[in-house]
Image (spheres, helix red, strand yellow):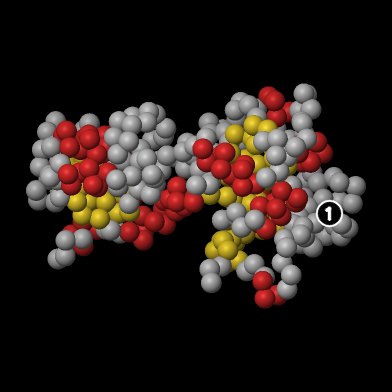
């Protein structure tokens, strides 16, 4: 058995633990298991959100003596002090005998934990179940690599691609089940982006709510993109997270600022002008598309100009999910590579 294959089973368990963690909060989903000399799991841990112990520290807290144990972690142990201390130092202090991880931490500040462990004389093995860990952590990893949040563009439209009637009314194109899924997706995002036009036309609350209208525990920060001020009595001012007004339409500046604020996942919800601009700029990493079996006609398209001059430049998508929600269809898609 190779050095890496012997750790695949515990790494798979660590990935299962990591998936229990929240998608929001700026931190990655990380799981950790501790193995004894016979390869048996003696402790487990995972990260439960910003400000809570990291996975390695959570696992270490469940053993009285970690000397000589092997730590199997989904992400390279961090090497910086934020709300908590560096996991690399915690592992060193605990006397861990070996560290195995799946993917390196791309953070300029948080990375280099493996180097610190090696300097302390701790053997390090990396790359175990790399692809599985990369898939789980991709939004966070890509946000860190690119210096901008992972972006999901959402729209709801009729089958003929209209997002509103000719008079501008748009409530409700889709049914209750589709709208509830949107609330769940909002709760899985650090921020929700809309344009000033949507705020002025629809006065949305942009909260994430449950079936009974109750606020969900996780709420995205509402971000209004544009130069126009929003009214003092806008519903957004009552949002539990407050509201961030960018004061600019420069998407590069907006994305960089959001990343600097620790925002790693963004949900673009309104309206067609903003969604089209985000897609045209190449920022759309996922698409959440809701289709109602209805026709409206007219000029109110869900997506506008994308700057695509010919079929040679068409943006093709890979649809990996199709779900029936009442009478509506939900499609999840990502840009096709190549």
Instruction: Give me the residue at 90% from left, 47% from top.
Output: 167
Question: Picture coordinates of residue 109 (x, y %)?
Answer: 37, 40
Q: Nearer the viewer, residue 140 or 62?
A: 140
- Who is closer to the viewer here, 254 or 38? 254
Identify the residue shown where x is 59% and y is 51%.
152
| Count of picture labels | 1
Give the quarter of the figure containing the N terminus.
bottom left
> Do we see residue 177 in this rendering?
no
Q: Is residue 164 above or below residue 195?
A: below
Across and down, in percent, residue 10 comes to 23, 52
Say which quarter of the image contains residue 159. Answer: bottom right
What is the residue that sits farthest to the bottom in this orientation? 312
Q: For residue 333, which quarter of the picture?
A: bottom right
In this image, 204 relative to 94: left or right? right
Identify the residue at horizontal 62%, vertical 69% (top origin). 316
Tag 1 residue: 300
| Residue under the image location 89 percent in, 51 percent down | 166
* Up/down of 188 relative to 282, above or below: above
Circle 1 crowding by C-alpha within 10 Å: few under 14, some 14–19, many from 20: many
Q: For this view, does 226 lie left or right of residue 335?
A: right
Quadrant in which residue 42 is drawn: top left
Q: Position of residue 225 (x, y in %)?
A: 69, 40
């Amino acid at each position: 058995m190779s050095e890496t294959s012997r750790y695949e089973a515990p790494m798979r368990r660590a990935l299962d633990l990591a998936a229990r963690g929240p998608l929001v909060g700026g931190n990655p989903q990380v799981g950790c298991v501790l193995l004894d000399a016979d390869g048996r799991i003696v402790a487990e841990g995972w990260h439960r959100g910003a400000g809570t112990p990291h996975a390695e520290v959570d696992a270490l807290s469940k053993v009285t003596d970690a000397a000589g144990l092997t730590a199997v972690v989904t992400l390279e142990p961090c090497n910086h002090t934020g709300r908590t201390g560096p996991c690399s130092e915690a592992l060193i202090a605990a006397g861990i005998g070996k560290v195995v991880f799946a993917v390196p931490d791309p953070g300029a500040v948080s990375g280099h934990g493996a180097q610190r462990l090696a300097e302390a004389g701790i053997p390090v093995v990396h790359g175990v179940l790399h692809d599985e860990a990369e898939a789980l952590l991709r939004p966070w990893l890509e946000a860190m690599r690119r210096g901008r949040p992972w972006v999901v563009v959402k729209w709801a439209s009729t089958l003929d691609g209209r997002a509103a009637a000719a008079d501008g009314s748009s409530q409700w194109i889709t049914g209750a089940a589709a709208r509830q899924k949107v609330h769940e997706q909002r709760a899985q995002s650090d921020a929700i982006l809309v344009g000033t036009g949507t705020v002025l036309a629809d006065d949305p609350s942009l909260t994430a709510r449950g079936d009974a209208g109750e606020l969900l525990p996780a709420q995205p920060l509402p971000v209004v993109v544009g130069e126009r001020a929003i009214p003092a009595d806008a519903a957004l001012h009552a949002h539990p997270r407050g509201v961030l007004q960018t004061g600019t339409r420069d998407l590069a500046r907006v994305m960089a600022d959001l990343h600097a604020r620790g925002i790693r996942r963004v949900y673009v919800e309104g309206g067609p002008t903003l969604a089209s601009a985000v897609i045209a700029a190449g920022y759309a990493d996922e698409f959440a598309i809701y289709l109602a079996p209805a026709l409206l006609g007219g000029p109110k398209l869900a997506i506008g100009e994308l700057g695509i001059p010919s079929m040679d430049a068409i943006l093709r998508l890979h649809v990996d999910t199709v779900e029936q929600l009442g009478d509506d269809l939900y499609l999840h898609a990502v840009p096709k590579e190549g």
